Image (cartoon, rainbow, N blue to C red):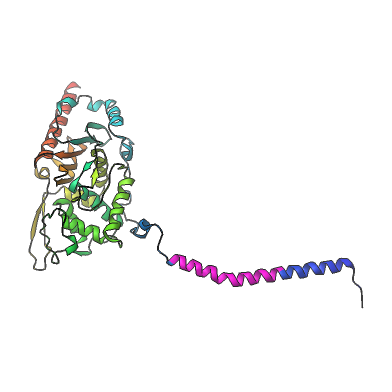
Amino acid sequence: MPRFPASHSRSDQRRRSGAARLTRLLFVLLFTGPIVLTGGACASNQSPSNPDRATLAPTPPKPYVNASAPVNPSGYDWRNIEGTQDGWRLNERSREWSGLNRAALNLHSASAMIVDERGNVLYSKNARAVRPIASVTKLMTAMVVLDTGVSLQTPIRIVEDDRDRLKNSRSRLRIDDAILPRREMIMVAIMSSDNRAAHALGRTTFRGGTEAFIQAMNRKARALGMHNTHFVDSSGLDPRNRSTAEDLVKMVRAASNYPLIRETTSRGEMTLRPFRDGTALQYRNTNPLVRSPEWTVEVSKTGFINEAGRCLAMQARIDNRHFYMVFLGSDGKLGPMGDSNRVREWILASNTRTTAAR
């Protein structure tokens, strides 16, 4: 038998060893590949561990994508007003408000804040006091619905679950009879403050129902820098819906970026037909200032429950300037309106003095 050099024998051994390793590797891949693929498929079918993600709506379409962006002429970050102190310092450097006599403004509301469109805090009273906010909540409800991009034409029926069993408030939207497109349901909720409409919106917007909607409200509040705000329902009937005047200034400003909210909350009245027989219902804005010739109200929401007192959050134009006004815990049905008129006269008087001084 022929003899081969020792070097050839070692080379053959290495080739055989390499072939054996390759064979074992292929065997492992063939055996474990289906397991890996099956595991991936099972993981993709499981619900996310984070319940918030499980109920997230689709990415909202324009114009709502950047509705909470803190954009303004001064570059001031509205998510971090850092309240009264920073605001006062900013205001003191602003010559345009140097003529304001803050001691002359005697507001009756327990908490209040007045801010111009540049982030200047003109007035602040207990602006960081956490209080129930009643139906001012509904501005957040409308924003969350609009952020989802869900169809505004989808009909929504008022059902037994929408009945208010906490405060027993009334509604003309009859159970199992009233049906409105989602757009009109939003309008009823934020203009005439209908609680059944607000509850129906919270119930029908997310697959996770009302619970998922409340989670989205609180996420939105955090995104807006509303650090002292918490929601537990979509109507504001629950006194555990709490916020501050400072936080609500941020919310009103964010709401002003939504055309439907501006259009609806600035109108005086509207007519809807929610019933099969076509019966017309006339709705009026709960803020009478929108019907006053002296006022240009651009965004508005009132609120009242016993625990909160009378509340008002709005954006208004005075002497060609935009102002954000929040009044919480006022006594008397027209308490916030009286404070609003005091603020308007105070600003106009200040502008007159400043113009005369020039």
* Vertical relation: 173 (above or below) 3: above
Q: What residue is at 26 percent from the left and 49 percent from the top?
A: 231
Q: Quadrant of the N terminus?
A: bottom right
101 left or right, relative to 18 = left
Q: Is residue 185 magenta?
A: no
* Vertical relation: 173 (above or below) 70: below
Which secondary structure dominates the residues rendered in magenta?
helix
* Vertical relation: 5 (above or below) 293: below
Question: Which residue occupies the extreme bottom position in the image?
Answer: 1
Give x and y (percent) for residue 77: 33, 38
Which quadrant holds residue 189? bottom left
Q: Is residue 90 among what the camera can see? A: yes
Give x and y (percent) for residue 200: 20, 60
Magenta segment boundaries in residue numbering:
21-44
Q: Quadrant of the C terminus?
A: top left
Instruction: Looking at the picture, tell me which residue is in the foreground, 267 or 56.
Output: 56
Q: What residue is at 18 percent from the left and 60 percent from the top?
A: 162
Which quadrant holds residue 72? top left
